Each structure stands twice: as structure tokens, then as C-alpha cells.
Amino acid sequence: MFVDNPLPSFNQKMLWLVALLGLGSVGIALVSQHVFNMQPCPWCILQRVIFLAIAAVALIASLLQGMFSRPTGTRFVVALLALGLIALAFSGVAAAVYQEQVAVKLDSCVMTFADTFMTDLGWGDIFPDVFLARATCAEAAVNLLGIPYAYWGMLVYLLIALLGLIVLVRNLRGQRR
């Protein structure tokens, strides 16, 4: 039932990379916040949650990809998880674009989707150093190398979507290595 080959497959490596990109993005955001005093807005926090969800899905898919030697059902489940990664990545793209094109022009982010969602989730109360919005979207609008910070996140989401697509196609075709 379990795979005898201890070496990770190409798909597993892609999924690990996706998880690393998600966790690394949150890590960079936390360094930006706590070291460089770039305080997050509700849309920034929502993107952190999306990155963490991506990392969790990628790790689960990677475990499933490498766990079983009867690959047909597992490949289908991993393909569905890869499709979920792509959907999460595009939700992150939408959040980044909305943040940069709309939210930064608002006087307040209060009562926007991101603010309401994060308040309802309640993580800001439990983990305020990670999930508490401390700035308005206009205050959080920062450029890095001339590119809005939200667009850097968008580029990472697009890379994740591409990697998810590769894993999806490879699983649908039955390719593990």
C-alpha cells in the first residue's frame, strides 16, 4: 500500500515548493511588519490567510502524492487539491488587485470584505501579531523596488497557480516522476 521508493516525486517537489512559497510569503510579510514597521491592512491579512491555506493544501497533497502505491484514486484526489491550489491562488490575485486598485483609494478598509471576513474569523484576537490589521489600506500601500507590495504577492500567487496547474496536469495524465 505504501510506496517503497523514499525519493520524492516531481509532483511532490512542486507541492513542497508551493508550500514553501506560501509560508515564505507570510514570513516575509511578518518580517516587513515587525522589523520594518510596515503595518498590515485587512487585505494584507486576508492574503496571509490565503497563503497559509495554500501551504496547508500543498502539504496535504504532497503527503497523499507520496504515500500510496495504488495511484489512481490518489492521483484524482491530488488533482482536485491542485485545482483547489489554483483557485486559492486566483483568489489571492483578486485580493491583491482589489487592494491595489480599489482599497488603497478608500478612506477606510472597515466593513470591506477583507475586514468583515477577518473579524468573523477571529484570528486577530487569538494571534494579533500575525492576523490583526493595524493600518488602513492607504497607509499600508508601500512600493518595493518601484512595484506595489500587493503586486509582489500577486506574482507569487501567479507562480503558485502555474505550479498547481503543472501538478494538476501531471496527475490527470498519471505522471508521478
Image (cartoon, helix red, strand yellow):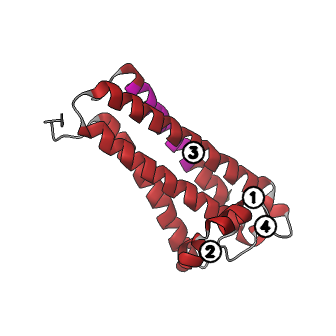
Residue drawn at x 44%, y 25% is: 169
Where disc 1 sits, the SS reads helix
Q: Is residue 74 left or right of residue 105?
A: left
* On screen, residue 123 above or below 101: below
**Residue annotated with mark 2:** 132
Disc marking residue 109: 4
Q: Are marks 3 and 4 in contact (CB under 8 Å)?
A: no
Q: What residue occupies the far top of the structure in this picture?
A: 173
Q: To which quarter of the image does residue 148 belong? A: bottom right
Q: Dot 2, how many residues are within 10 Å of its Cα: few (below 14), some (14-19), or many (20+)?
A: many
| Label 4, label 2: how far apart the Cα atoms are | 13 Å
Q: Magenta region: which residues?
A: 156-171
The residue that appears at 52% across and 55% down in the rendered structure is 51
Q: In the rendered image, which quarter contains the N terminus?
A: top left
User: How far across and down, in percent of the image, does residue 73 sit?
Assistant: 34, 28
Judge whether residue 121 can be spotted in this image: yes
Q: Earlier in the sequence, mark 3 or mark 4?
A: 3
Residue 148: in magenta span: no
Mark 1 neighbour density, 10 Å: few (under 14) some (14–19) many (20 or more): some
Distance of label 3 from label 4 (alpha carbons): 22 Å
Residue at image mark 1: 113
C-alpha gap between disc 2 and disc 3: 22 Å
Mark 2–mark 1 distance (CA, rounded to whole Å): 15 Å
- Per the picture, the main secondary structure of the magenta-coloured stretch is helix
